[in-house]
Image: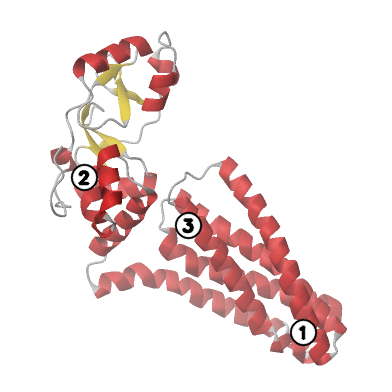
Amino acid sequence: MNIAAGIPNFDAAVADHARKDFPLLDADMTVGTALERIRREGVGERVIYFYVVDEQERLAGVVPTRRLLTASLETPLSEIMVRRVVTIPASATVLDACEFFVLYKFLAFPVVDEQLRVIGIIDANLFAEEILEAGDSEDRSRSRATGLVGPEFFEALGFRIEQIRVASPWRGFRFRFPWLLVTVTGGTLSAILAGFFQATLARSLVLAFFLTMVLALNESVSMQSMSVTIHALRSISVTSGWLAAAFRREVITALLLGVACGLVVSAIVWLWRNDFTGALVIGGSIAVSLVSACVLGLGIPSLLHRFKLDPKIAAGPVTLALADFIALVIYFTSAWLVLR
């Protein structure tokens, strides 16, 4: 397939850009028979995945190249193929295909008709050359030579989709304002919550002095955790194993950050106001709330990514609003329990 010199027509049918130079494998083949067909029919310009069809020529699965090359020759394809295949319908546009690449981060998709018959393959290189123009020539040459693209491609492609989708100030407003309402709602709830603890704040003014610092620390930690998570989501799939490992890492990091920040702020309160009780409340609240901030920074982008929402736009307002509210709950509740 020749890569267009400019930006492709995003309203064009994706089937017009699909490659036809690929072999289809039968589900009842063995690995050895499949390799013989591939050698006989060729692999076309690029090969990333091999697609398997049933007796009615309908898509039955996909075999990654690595599995095909490492399995024994007698192994049936039905044992090594992945049966759940993400497909692009023939009626889709090029813009629809862009969104598939951003959401699923595969390097190619089969284009199928209504009977699930494969009519072509669309791969990331349809968009890669134009979108990666800003990169250095060495990186682009490596991308052409290998037929593969890095995670930066998917991020750039996502931004290009938003530029197309949000073509006017009004559309940009409609896209972004609902998420800012989350911040307004969170701030309103936090203000109402603070109203319930007026008497507690009146008993210890030092709590009011350090309220801004507590919120700022929580927002900073949640944003740090969220940024790391969004960066990781560019190139990986959210699985239970990944979430468990990331959760353990973030909790340990949060504990270290919370204890360190809590001790520093407690020392400041004690030395400045000679208020041991206030220092205990503020430092302890910081230590606990930073753990919740880290967990939110990990969990919310992962959840949004799981439901195919854009974590870059939505995660910030949601994470910050929840982090502030939970921090205030911990802060005021701790003060009420200690100072009553």
| Comes first in the chain, label 2 or label 3 | 2
Res. 268 mark: 1
**In terms of image quadrants, where is residue 192?**
bottom right
Q: Secondary structure at mark 3?
A: helix
- Residue at x-position 43% and y-position 47%: 235
Mark 2 is surrounded, within 10 Å at the Cα level, by few (under 14), some (14 to 19) or many (20 or more) other residues, namely some
Marks 2/3 in contact by CB < 8 Å: the verdict is no
In the displayed structure image, the side of residue 259 where residue 298 appears, left or right: left
- Residue at x-position 51% and y-position 66%: 318
Q: Is residue 108 above or below residue 171?
A: above
| Residue type at numbered disc 2 | Leu
Mark 3 is surrounded, within 10 Å at the Cα level, by few (under 14), some (14 to 19) or many (20 or more) other residues, namely many
For the residue pair 191 and 229, the one nearer the viewer reads as 229
Q: Secondary structure at mark 1?
A: helix
| Comes first in the chain, label 3 or label 1 | 3
In the picture, the quarter occupied by the N terminus is top left
Res. 230 mark: 3
- Residue at x-position 16% and y-position 54%: 7
**In terms of image quadrants, where is residue 310?**
bottom left
Q: Secondary structure at mark 2?
A: helix
**In terms of image quadrants, where is residue 80?**
top left
In the picture, the quarter occupied by the C terminus is bottom right
Q: Name the residue that disc number 2 marks.
A: 126
In the displayed structure image, the side of residue 251 where residue 87 appears, left or right: left
Q: Is residue 196 visible?
A: yes
